[in-house]
Image (cartoon, rainbow, N blue to C red):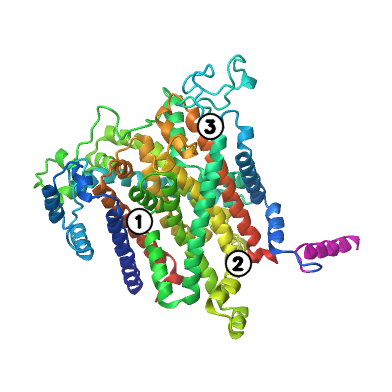
């Protein structure tokens, strides 16, 4: 088990290294003079020479790559051109929102997807089964930014004034602001230390922050603002999970041991829950990891729709502003999250399935 | 007795139909027959057929030129809601079944012409990705060793990114535009084809007829392209069909963000993206392009599902 885990960990290293090479090359492939694109067209030759020397751009490419690795290892992604602030600080402010959205969407997609899958499988070949799967097919075919806009219209405009109304944009209602838990608890923090930055990062998970400080008004408000974006992001993974759960459960329900269980008189509910479901979940777990990509891509598209200040929207804005340090840093970061999540899924798979667990 | 006779006659009919007796039926014909027997295949073919017809006959179907600004020509205002005479809209007003967009153009005509662009996007991205991926995958699978390792590790790196994100990063470097968006989507879908081709080639290359070709003195490349690859293509056909769907969806996403097709191109994603801020006042400008995307993507997904069933060797017996 440990041996396999180490082997799997080691196999992720070349991929991560490759991701760094790709993002490094992307930044070097951008046409135009980096000095002029950073400092503007009217910059003097002397300033440019100083700029090139300062950022090590006069060094050979492999040396530049080593500098790049060193900076990333130190958590230094350079300064944003547009905001003249460290990119790391921007990540601390923006990433928690995106993660909050992705986690909520993952919870919705998993729970609802599995429930729908079981529902359809137990009514195999009935109208309910065919209907659910047809809906799942439509769900997979929907562009989530469109679904998001439609939901914003239905819940934010058409249902205005009813209890079903949900806020169609933003993270908190006007007039509310999230107070970090360390300020609520009067913690004295040393400025600019890793610990302080980490606590700031954690406190930017508004829902979590409100939960631990017991601020229910913010908690409910933040949660309500997340319902529509999370549902939009969750749709495609939910449909995929539902289809996977259904086919996997149908496969397991046809096995001999399930027939045996039925033959000895185990009630139908219990057959599904105790005997079949565990085995049917294995392929679903694999799919779950792959859906992380859909969740992250979904976050990029939905944040734009719902006016949420997360990394996805920032990334798109940065592309138009030619803010390359942000584009580079965000790409590395999201890809790393993706690889790590898939690593965790792979490892949990070996834990769940004794057959692939090496002795 | 009679029922037994009918049963055996039926069985014989099935055998003949599947080409075991009588004249051999080509694989594509068998596949098509099986495809049209399944509901998903029927619906998929219907939806795609519909979209292809719309694309071909766009000039006939569309009442206006997709880029014609109607201000001064007709009594219309910007972002006028749909006006259908059949549903009680004032007959004196010009009919626009999907309304008028922010630049006073007919939405329906733009949508109709948009089908050409979306189908083109789907087919082009899949073709580029398919050719590259199949080439890389078959080389990796057939030659093995370090060639295999180098190619597949590169593919792993591409798969290390969520696909839309990598496409966005590539467009960021190349600059927004439909050609660059197509290129980016092709690049991110190459690993899928490479992986499937490699696995398929690996299973085919160990079969006897390949060994026979080798004994007869066929060169490596010749065997790969004339013996192995044609027999390894089945799973790739399914993947490519689904690939058209995801290509269209990803291109629409890029265009929605403003990174793909640029206005005034009547691309569905671009139409959605440029009007998204008017969602609350003119929902029709967002609703219809989205429906068009759903129909097309659904069609290709269903066709892919149907093809997978039709081509599955376990169901062929």
Tell me the quarter of the picture where residue B314 sits.
bottom right
Place of residue A277 in the rendered image (x, y in percent of width and height, measured from the top left)? 50, 58
- For disc 2, the marked residue is A256
- Chain letter of disc 1? A
From mark 2 to mark 3, how far is it between C-alphas?
Answer: 60 Å
Classify mark 2: helix, strand or loop: helix
Quadrant position of residue B253: top left
Q: Position of residue A29 (x, y in %)?
A: 30, 55
Crowd tier of the residue under label 3, counting other residues whose Cα lies within 10 Å: few below 14, some 14–19, many 20 or above: many
Front one among A324 and A89: A324
The residue at which mark 3 appears reads as B66
User: Do callouts 2 and 3 mark residues in contact (Cβ within 8 Å)?
Assistant: no
Picture coordinates of residue A114 (x, y %)?
Answer: 49, 51
Residue A41 within the segment the image draws in magenta: no
Residue A141 is tagged as: none
Label 2 vs label 3, nearer the camera: 3
| Disc 3, SS | loop
Q: What are the residue bounds of the magenta stretch?
A: B1-20
| Residue annotated with mark 1 | A338
Label 2 – label 1 distance at C-alpha: 38 Å
Give percent across and percent down for residue B137: 48, 67
Q: Is residue B5 magenta?
A: yes
Can you say whether A88 is above or below A174 in the image? below
Q: Residues within 10 Å of mark 2 (few under 14, many from 20)?
A: few
- Give the residue furthest to the right: B2
């Amino acid at each position: 088990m440990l041996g396999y885990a180490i082997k799997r960990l080691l196999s992720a290293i070349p991929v991560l290294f490759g991701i760094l090479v790709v993002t490094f090359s992307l930044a070097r492939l951008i046409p135009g003079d980096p000095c002029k694109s950073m400092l503007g067209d009217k910059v003097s030759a002397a300033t440019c020479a100083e700029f090139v020397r300062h950022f090590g751009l006069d060094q050979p490419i492999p040396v530049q790559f080593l500098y790049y690795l060193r900076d990333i290892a130190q958590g230094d992604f350079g300064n944003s051109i547009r905001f003249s602030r460290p990119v790391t600080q921007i990540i601390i402010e923006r990433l928690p929102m995106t993660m909050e959205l992705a986690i909520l969407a993952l919870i919705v997609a998993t729970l609802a997807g599995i429930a729908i899958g079981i529902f359809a499988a137990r009514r195999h070949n009935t109208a309910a089964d065919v209907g659910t799967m047809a809906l799942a097919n439509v769900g997979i075919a929907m562009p989530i930014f469109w679904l998001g806009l439609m939901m914003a219209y239905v819940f934010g405009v058409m249902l205005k004034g009813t209890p079903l109304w949900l806020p169609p944009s933003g993270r908190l209602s006007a007039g509310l602001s999230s107070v970090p838990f360390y300020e609520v608890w009067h913690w004295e923090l040393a400025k600019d230390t890793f610990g302080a930055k980490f606590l700031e990062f954690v406190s930017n998970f508004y829902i979590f922050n409100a939960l631990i400080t017991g601020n229910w008004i913010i908690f409910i408000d933040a949660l309500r603002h997340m319902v529509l974006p999370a549902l939009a992001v969750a749709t495609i993974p939910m449909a995929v999970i539902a289809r996977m759960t259904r086919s996997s459960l149908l496969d397991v329900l046809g096995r001999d041991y399930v027939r045996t269980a039925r033959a000895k008189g185990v009630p139908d509910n219990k057959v599904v829950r105790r005997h079949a479901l565990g085995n049917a979940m294995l392929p679903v777990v694999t799919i779950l990891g792959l859906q992380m990509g859909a969740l992250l891509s979904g976050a990029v598209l939905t944040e734009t729709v719902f006016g949420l200040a997360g990394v996805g929207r920032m990334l798109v804005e940065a592309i138009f502003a030619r803010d390359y340090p942000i584009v580079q840093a965000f790409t590395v970061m999201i890809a790393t999250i993706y690889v790590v999540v898939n690593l965790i899924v792979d490892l949990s798979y070996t834990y769940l399935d004794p057959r692939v667990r090496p002795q | 007795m009679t029922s037994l006779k009918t049963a055996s006659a039926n069985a014989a009919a099935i055998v003949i139909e599947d080409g075991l007796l009588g004249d051999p039926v080509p694989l594509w014909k068998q596949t098509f027959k099986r495809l049209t027997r399944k509901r998903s295949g029927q619906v998929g073919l219907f939806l795609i057929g519909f979209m292809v017809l719309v694309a071909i006959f766009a000039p006939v179907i569309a009442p206006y030129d997709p880029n014609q600004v109607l201000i001064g020509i007709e009594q219309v205002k910007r972002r006028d809601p749909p006006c259908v005479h059949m549903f009680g809209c004032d007959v004196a007003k010009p009919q626009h079944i999907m309304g008028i967009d922010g630049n006073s153009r007919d939405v329906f005509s733009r949508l109709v012409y948009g089908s050409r662009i979306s189908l083109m996007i789907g087919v082009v991205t899949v073709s580029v990705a398919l050719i590259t991926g199949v080439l890389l995958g078959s080389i990796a699978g057939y030659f093995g060793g370090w060639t295999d390792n180098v190619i597949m590790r590169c593919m792993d790196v591409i798969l290390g990114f969520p696909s839309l994100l990598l496409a966005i990063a590539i467009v960021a470097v190349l600059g927004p535009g439909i050609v660059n968006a197509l290129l980016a989507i092709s690049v991110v879908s190459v690993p899928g084809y490479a992986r499937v081709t490699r696995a398929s080639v690996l299973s085919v290359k160990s079969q006897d007829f390949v060994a026979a070709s080798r004994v007869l003195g066929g060169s490596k490349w010749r065997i790969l392209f004339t013996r192995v690859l044609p027999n390894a293509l089945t799973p790739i056909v399914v993947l490519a069909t689904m690939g058209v769907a995801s290509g269209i969806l990803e291109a629409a996403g890029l265009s929605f963000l403003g990174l793909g097709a640029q206005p005034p191109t009547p691309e569905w994603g671009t139409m959605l993206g440029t009007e998204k801020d008017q969602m609350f006042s003119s929902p029709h400008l967002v609703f219809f392009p989205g429906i068009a995307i759903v129909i097309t993507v659904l069609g290709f997904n269903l066709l892919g599902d149907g093809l997978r069933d039709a081509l599955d060797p376990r169901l062929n017996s």
